Image (tube, grey):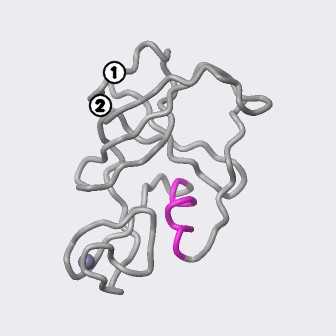
Amino acid sequence: MNPPRPIPKLDTLNRPFWTGGAQGKLNITLCGDCGEYTHPPLPLCRHCQSENVAPHAVPGTGEVDTFTINYQPWAKGLEVPLVIARVRLDDVPGVYLTTNIVNCAVEDVHFDDKVRVTFEEQGEIYYPLFEKVN
Ligand SMILES: [Zn+2]
């Protein structure tokens, strides 16, 4: 069973991020003026305040920047233990996603492990989770 996750409230800004998985895409907001990324999505570039921002599909690979193993069943139906990680995305400097590392034993997750995105569908939301590469 899937762990219960908070359901994001979709709006025009965050919809590409939360629903991009339907097309297998991890969309991060990219500035057309300075070329920097902004996440979570904002109407303005966080670097240069330009409004010339749009969702951009990024490679969806990265590395485990840091993580913790959660043993506490803090919600009904939550399967523990689970890994809560901060993933550093390849080719998306300055953007980190807080996510789960799935499809492996919790003791197999280490700092700097190579990971790639995998999507968990719940309704129209596609949660970007990550699994180890190799
Ligand atoms: Zn910018």
**Disc 1 and disc 2 in contact, CB within 8 angstroms:** no
Image position of 81 with respect to 126: above or below: above
Callout 2 environment at 10 Å: few (<14), some (14 to 19), or many (20+)?
Answer: many
- Closer to us: mark 1 or mark 2? 1
Task: Name the residue located 31 percent from the left edge and 36 percent from the top edge.
Answer: 65
Residue 62 location (% of width, % of height): 30, 41
Residue 115 location (% of width, % of height): 35, 34
Magenta: predominant secondary structure element?
helix
Three-letter residue code for mark 1: His
Magenta segment: does it hold 18?
A: yes
Residue under numbered circle 1: 110
Q: Is mark 2 within 8 Å of ligand 1?
A: no
Image position of 105 with respect to 125: above or below: above
Residue 64 location (% of width, % of height): 33, 33
Furthest toward the left, the residue is 34
Task: Name the residue located 51 percent from the left edge and 67 percent from the top edge.
Answer: 16
The image quadrant where one finds the N terminus is: top right
The segment highlighted magenta reads: 13-21
Q: Is mark 1 within 8 Å of ligand 1?
A: no
Tell which of 21 and 92 is nearer to you: 92
Disc 1 to disc 2, C-alpha distance: 9 Å
**Kind of element beneath mark 2:** strand
Tell which of 123 and 86 is nearer to you: 86
**Kind of element beneath mark 1:** loop
Image position of 11 with respect to 112: above or below: below
Residue 114 location (% of width, % of height): 29, 31
Callout 1 environment at 10 Å: few (<14), some (14 to 19), or many (20+)?
Answer: some
Tell whether 6 sits left or right of 92.
right
The image quadrant where one finds the C terminus is: top left
Task: Name the residue located 56 percent from the left edge and 24 percent from the top edge.
Answer: 70
Residue under numbered circle 2: 114
